[in-house]
Image: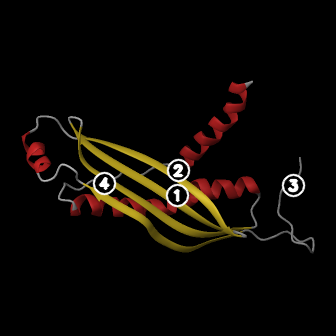
Amino acid sequence: MADNTPVQPNGQATQAQLALQKIYVRDASFEAPNAPRIFQEIGESQQAPQVQLNLSHKADQLADGVFEVVLTLTLTCTLQDRTVYLAEVHQAGIFGVAGFADAERDAILGSYCPNVLFPYARQMISELVVNGGFPPFLLQPINFDALYSEQLRRRAEAPAANA
């Protein structure tokens, strides 16, 4: 089996480096399209509002060994097919990731970086919902390691399904 350890031009192994350079909100939005009537409807309804979370992330290379990772959380709350609110946050970070083999780098960008960004995105979602006049919503922790493993498993199965 070949060793995939990155090597410098002088033949020495490159020391792996991982550095968080910046965390920022790339985009945030909140909509309550049926306000103010929806506040009364929630109080009168016998049903609890339904909440759906959509989660995604992407990583783009900005420079050699520098990546922007964007974690997107979209929270949609509905009551009897009417939108109560929609909150969306694009939480971003710039990470220096150098000296790792490709598979290790991909795992860092697909698991470690979203784990770092998630608490910031969760706080932002919570603030948007409360500032919109609704009861607090606390997102439960997410296991990005398991999500990344599942993504790898699906990629491995995709070629087999096409054969």
Lower sequence index among marks 3 and 1: 3
Residue at left offset 42%, top offset 46%: 54
Work out which quarter of the rendered image holds the C terminus and state it: top right
Q: Pointer 2: residues within 10 angstroms few (<14), some, or many (20+)? A: some
Res 140 seen here:
no
Q: Amino acid at mark 2?
A: Phe
Asked which secondary structure carries label 1, the reply is helix
**Spatial distance from mark 3 to mark 1, Cα to Cα?**
28 Å
Looking at the rendered structure, the kind of residue marked 3 is Asp
**Image: 1 above or below 92:** above
Is the C-beta separation of discs 2 and 1 under 8 Å?
A: yes
Q: Do the numbered discs 4 and 1 sit on residues whose CB atoms are within 8 Å?
A: no
Q: Nearer the viewer, residue 54 or 82?
A: 82
How packed is label 1: few (under 14 Cα within 10 Å), some, or many (20 or more)?
many
Q: Amino acid at mark 4?
A: Leu
Residue topped by disc 4: 138
The disc placed on residue 60 is none
Name which of mark 3 and mark 2 comes first in the sequence: 3
Q: Which one is in front in this view, the residue at disc 3 or the one at disc 1?
A: 1
Q: Are marks 3 and 2 in contact (CB under 8 Å)?
A: no
Label pair 2/4, CB-CB below 8 angstroms:
no
SS of the residue at dot 4? loop
| CB under 8 Å between discs 3 and 1 | no
Q: Amino acid at mark 1?
A: Pro
Instruction: First in sequence, mark 2 or 4: give its number.
Output: 4
Q: Which residue is mark 1?
A: 114
Residue 7 seen in render = yes
Which residue is labeled 3 in the image?
3
| Residue assigned mark 2 | 144
Image spot of residue 8 (x, y percent):
87, 71
How far separated are the C-alphas under marks 2 and 4?
17 Å
